Amino acid sequence: MTVRETVDAFHYGRFHLVQPKGIGHRSGMDAMLLAALVTGDGPMRVADLGAGAGAAGLAVAARIEKAEVLLVERSPLMAGFARKTLALPANAALASRVSVLEADVALAGKARIAAGLADDVFDHVIMNPPFNDRIDSRTPDALKAEAHAMEHDLFERWIKTAGAIMKPGGQLSLIARPQSIAEIIAACGRRFGGIEITALHARAGENALRILVTAVKGSRTRLALRMPLVMHEPGQHDFTPFVDDLNNGRAAYLRLPR
Amino acid sequence: MTVRETVDAFHYGRFHLVQPKGIGHRSGMDAMLLAALVTGDGPMRVADLGAGAGAAGLAVAARIEKAEVLLVERSPLMAGFARKTLALPANAALASRVSVLEADVALAGKARIAAGLADDVFDHVIMNPPFNDRIDSRTPDALKAEAHAMEHDLFERWIKTAGAIMKPGGQLSLIARPQSIAEIIAACGRRFGGIEITALHARAGENALRILVTAVKGSRTRLALRMPLVMHEPGQHDFTPFVDDLNNGRAAYLRLPR
């Protein structure tokens, strides 16, 4: 099968992404906002679970100079795009800090470790799990089956893996649909505390399109529902300045002061 | 034991509430916002679960002329205050449409029905379940034990009762703390759909203090996270006009158009 591809610039050209065209998932704002949840400027190890072509992980690497990023992706096709992305000359400044692991995030126990995901390694784990919404009528059956990862217990399995591979005190960050909120909180369970949820609305008055969630491994701090982010001012097509900064790697979305 | 009491006006004097002073739970804005979630103007039967002195139920009766309201309260002390409230001459215009049932909302099956809570009766069920936060150091041990209703599975039990006593298509409305959001959604489970959640923030930029939740028995509509309500404009002590209207029975908080 021949897959057409595109090369897209992110963060005003600070990195580029090779992505399939017409099939699979194409990254965009979700991945950029997810990357904005990672804060800090010291050395850190970051795992991007379900990384696709590597958009969120590369956005972290582009903004945080000392971040080392592991892109974890089950699909050989998408992992191949991640490798093509890292091979782009335009990404040479980042590529030495980013690597690709072709593995299934949903693996557990010894199978997970054997696949290359060891315990207590990462400071940050980020995830933008696949949504059913991404699977549209144009998707071929084989890829549809591959992408149809929104199993009933997806968040339980992915967040379990995140908890296992993260150092104590490490931070989980994810972006998801609002209707997954209860499943996400339940999956955090006793593994994570200090859950902070920020709704993302396209415009004031409209329902949330996404939720941004962070949590800390081993924390006992209670959940906080933060003020939402609104992407557009009334009547404006452009993003609000803060959302634009998050989208372009010029700002991080900080957790609450403790 | 002698319990001091107060008589407080709500909705600009459209009804009054007899409440204990110094012990137990005193109603205020939470109950008024909860009442604002009940919409419609035709005849309707409304159950207020854990009604306390009857604040939310009376607020519904005051705003909706054809509403018949059952106040369900386990505590004999608080049910007594609800009866005193209904006996106030100032509440004469409402009292004929409001009654008190001394029963434990957490009862199930035949025990629930025997206690006076039959199946498929109500168009609306509202609840403002007790929070642990309400139990302060001044509370005597006996009342503390009585009020300590925030059992692990409180929402599961209360929402199960709500689903049972409500007509198909009936509406559940509740107000709760943000950290209960997952428990509430899980308890709605397959009983309710069309869950709509609105966060309530004191001021823009601050974390949510409460969530307002409505859901419809038997609905399959997916969850929506709505724009939050903000109580105060920056630098202002007064409520915003819309929140003030909700608080004073001059407006209802409508569900999304379908």
Image (cartoon, coloured by chain):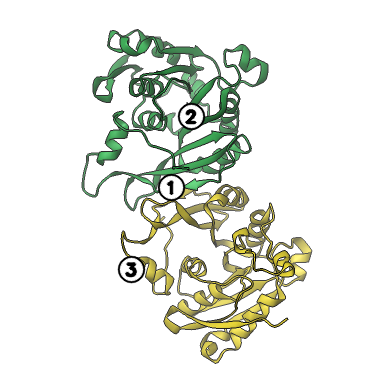
Chain colours: A green, B yellow
Q: Chain of mark 3?
A: B
Q: Inspect the image, locate mark 2, and give the three-letter code of the amino acid beneath it.
A: Pro
Inter-mark Cα distance, 3 to 2: 40 Å
Q: Inspect the image, locate mark 3, and give the three-letter code of the amino acid beneath it.
A: Pro
The residue that label 2 is drawn on is A129
Q: Chain of mark 2?
A: A
Residue B81, given in percent of the width and then of the height, sits at: 63, 80
Mark seen at residue B241? 3
In the rendered view, tell whether residue B188 sits above or below residue B4.
above
Horizontal arrangement in the rendering, residue A44 relative to residue B99 (left or right): left
Question: Would residue B197 be seen by someone viewing this image from the given angle?
Answer: yes
Inter-mark Cα distance, 1 to 3: 22 Å
In the rendered view, tell whether residue B46 sits above or below residue A237.
below
Mark seen at residue A226? 1
Q: Quadrant of the N terminus of chain B?
A: bottom right
Residue beneath the point at 56% across and 46% down: A222
- For marks 2 and 1 on the same chain, the one whose residue lies earlier in the sequence: 2
